[in-house]
Every structure is written in structure tokens, then in C-alpha cells.
């Protein structure tokens, strides 16, 4: 839950870079990136605490993966509203990121475990957005989104091949 709130807050901060809202882009990317890193920390801690305390459940797993997708959509929407990168690039990165997750979910529904398959799982993609996006160079977020898109595309291919071979 804290990861979701941190991600949504990061998205709002990214969105404030819109010229009409007035926050300079470099502050929005630095603060948004820090909040995105905090969100990742909470995601890791939430899962670990649930496993250690043996409070893992199907309901919790469902909510966790749903919150992850809501978080991703929020962040990309914030980047788009904040005009931190071209909307087309944001849509491509978001679409590929969601496809990475969909392919894993679909494979798992067929009994194929894809955990750890692919170079660009959600954590890696968000880490790239946060860290590269925080570089105070105009256009850094465009590079981050391009890298996320490439890594997500490679991951999609890796997961499709792995699933096909295991079916």
C-alpha cells in the first residue's frame, strides 16, 4: 500500500513539471525519482515482511500485482502530463511494460513459471526511470524511457521464447 502511495505521489510530482503548474522540470524529476525509489523500497519490504511473517495470501498477491500496475500507469501518466518526454514515447514504454507483466501472468496461468526470466522486470524498469530521470540534463527522461522500452521489448521476447519452450 505504501509503495502505491509513493508511486502515485511520484506521478503527481512528475506531472507538476507541466509549464502551467510551474515546478521546474529538474526539481520534478529529482523529487519524483526519489519518490519512485522509495516506492520500490516499500514494494520489496512489503513482500519480504509478508513472507517472513507467513502472511502471504492469494488476496495479498492479487492486490500487490494490481497495485504494481496502477503504480506504473500513474507514473507514465505523470511523465506525460508533466511533458517530461513525448507522449508517444511514454505510451510505448508503458505498453511494453504492461506487456511484460501480462506475458508473465498469462504464462503462469498455463503453469509456466517465469520468475526471473528477462532482463527488464518491473524493479529494473522503475530503477532506470528514477535514476536516469534524475540526471539534471534536459532530455534525460527521454533516454530513460527509450532504455525502458528497449529492455521491456527484450524481456517480452525472452519470456515468449521461454514460455513457448516450456509448453
Image: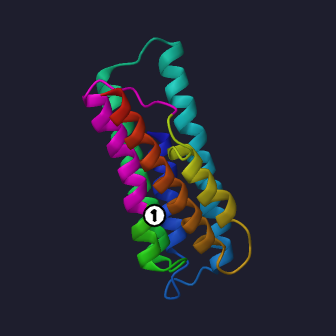
Q: Main secondary structure of the magenta part?
A: helix
Asked if residue 122 lies left or right of residue 142, the reply is: left
Q: Is residue 50 above or below residue 124?
A: above
Residue 17 rendering spot, x and y as whole percentages: 56, 78
Color theme of the render:
rainbow
Q: Is residue 63 above or below residue 19?
A: above
Residue 156 rendering spot, x and y as whole percentages: 42, 49
Residue 35 rendering spot, x and y as whole percentages: 60, 54
Does dot 1 land on a helix, a strand or a loop? helix
> Looking at the image, which is closer to me, 165 or 2?
165
The residue lying at 40 percent from left, 40 percent from top is 161
The image quadrant that residue 73 belongs to is: bottom left
Q: Which residues are magenta?
A: 94-116
The image quadrant that residue 102 belongs to is: top left
Residue 4 rendering spot, x and y as whole percentages: 45, 46
Q: Residue furthest front?
A: 165
Amino acid at each position: 500500500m505504501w509503495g502505491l502511495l509513493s508511486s502515485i505521489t511520484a506521478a503527481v510530482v512528475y506531472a507538476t513539471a507541466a509549464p502551467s503548474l510551474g515546478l521546474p522540470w529538474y526539481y520534478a524529476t529529482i523529487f519524483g525519482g526519489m519518490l519512485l525509489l522509495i516506492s520500490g523500497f516499500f514494494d520489496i519490504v512489503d513482500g519480504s515482511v509478508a513472507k517472513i511473517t507467513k502472511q502471504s495470501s492469494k488476496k495479498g498477491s492479487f492486490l500487490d500485482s494490481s497495485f504494481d500496475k496502477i503504480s506504473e500507469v500513474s507514473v507514465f501518466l505523470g511523465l506525460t502530463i508533466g511533458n517530461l518526454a513525448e507522449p508517444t514515447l511514454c505510451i510505448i514504454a508503458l505498453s511494453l511494460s504492461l506487456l511484460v507483466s501480462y506475458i508473465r501472468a498469462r504464462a503462469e496461468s498455463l503453469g509456466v513459471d517465469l520468475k526471473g526470466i528477462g532482463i527488464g522486470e518491473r524493479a529494473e524498469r522503475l530503477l532506470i526511470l528514477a535514476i536516469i530521470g534524475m540526471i539534471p540534463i534536459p532530455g534525460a527522461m527521454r533516454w530513460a524511457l527509450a532504455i525502458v522500452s528497449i529492455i521491456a521489448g527484450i524481456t517480452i521476447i525472452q519470456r515468449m521464447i521461454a514460455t513457448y519452450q516450456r509448453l
